Image (spheres, rainbow, N blue to C red):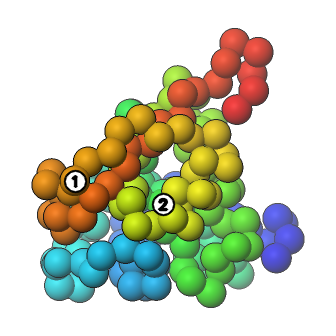
């Protein structure tokens, strides 16, 4: 995929179904504990969150293939369809979030999700805390990572 094929744009309300499809497919394929909510519950929850959080989608050929959902201080979701993993979609979305949150942000990732932890570490995020998972719904150990923000010199 060339970068000219990838379009990043703010999500619109009518993207809710596609965003949920990306979320569900990506979670099922990832090194993560199984979700504990039904697909219908996830779709309803994401539709609500899209009205409250910043959500950007990544499109290839007019199809939503990834998305990032974030607040002022947290990157809550960054998911890419499995058939687009490794093609630069996740990196483009993460770079976008960095540009929109230059002071930095945090995120949680499951400890068992080594591919995601490696992805974030290679892009400048650092591990700050590990938990036993008692604070998340899946009850799986997790890691809090942070992107400390852009330095005064402008590096990322």
Residue holding disc 1: 132
What residue appears at the point 79 percent right and 72 percent down from the top-left corner?
A: 5
Q: Secondary structure at mark 1?
A: loop
Q: CA distance from mark 1 to mark 2?
A: 22 Å
Q: Is residue 21 visible?
A: no
54 sits to left or right of 142: right
Q: Looking at the picture, how far across and down is residue 107, in whole percent?
A: 40, 46
Residue 44: give x, y in percent of width and height.
19, 73
Report whether residue 89 is seen. Answer: yes
Residue located at (69% from left, 12% from top): 152
In the rendered image of this protein, does residue 83 appear above or below residue 142?
A: below
Asked if the residue at tag 2 contacts the one at tag 1, i.e. Cβ–Cβ closer than 8 Å, the answer is no
Q: Earlier in the sequence, mark 1 or mark 2?
A: 2
Query: Against 85, is 136 above or below?
Result: above
**Mark linked to residue 78:** 2
Looking at the image, residue 41 sits to the left or right of residue 77; the answer is: left
The quarter of the picture where residue 63 lies is: bottom right
């Amino acid at each position: 995929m060339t970068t000219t094929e990838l379009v990043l744009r703010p999500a619109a309300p009518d993207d809710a179904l596609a965003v949920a499809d990306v979320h569900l497919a990506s979670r099922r394929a990832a090194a993560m504990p199984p979700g504990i909510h039904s697909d219908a519950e996830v779709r309803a929850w994401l539709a609500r969150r899209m009205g409250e959080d910043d959500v950007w989608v990544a499109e290839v050929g007019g199809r939503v293939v990834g998305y990032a959902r974030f607040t002022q201080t947290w990157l809550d979701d960054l998911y890419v369809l499995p058939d687009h993993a490794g093609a630069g979609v996740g990196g483009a979305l993460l770079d976008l979030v960095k540009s929109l949150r230059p002071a930095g942000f945090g995120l949680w990732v499951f400890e068992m999700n080594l591919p995601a932890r490696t992805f974030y570490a290679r892009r400048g995020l650092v591990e700050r805390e590990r938990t036993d998972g008692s604070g998340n719904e899946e009850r799986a150990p997790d890691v809090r990572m942070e992107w400390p923000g852009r330095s005064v010199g402008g590096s990322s």
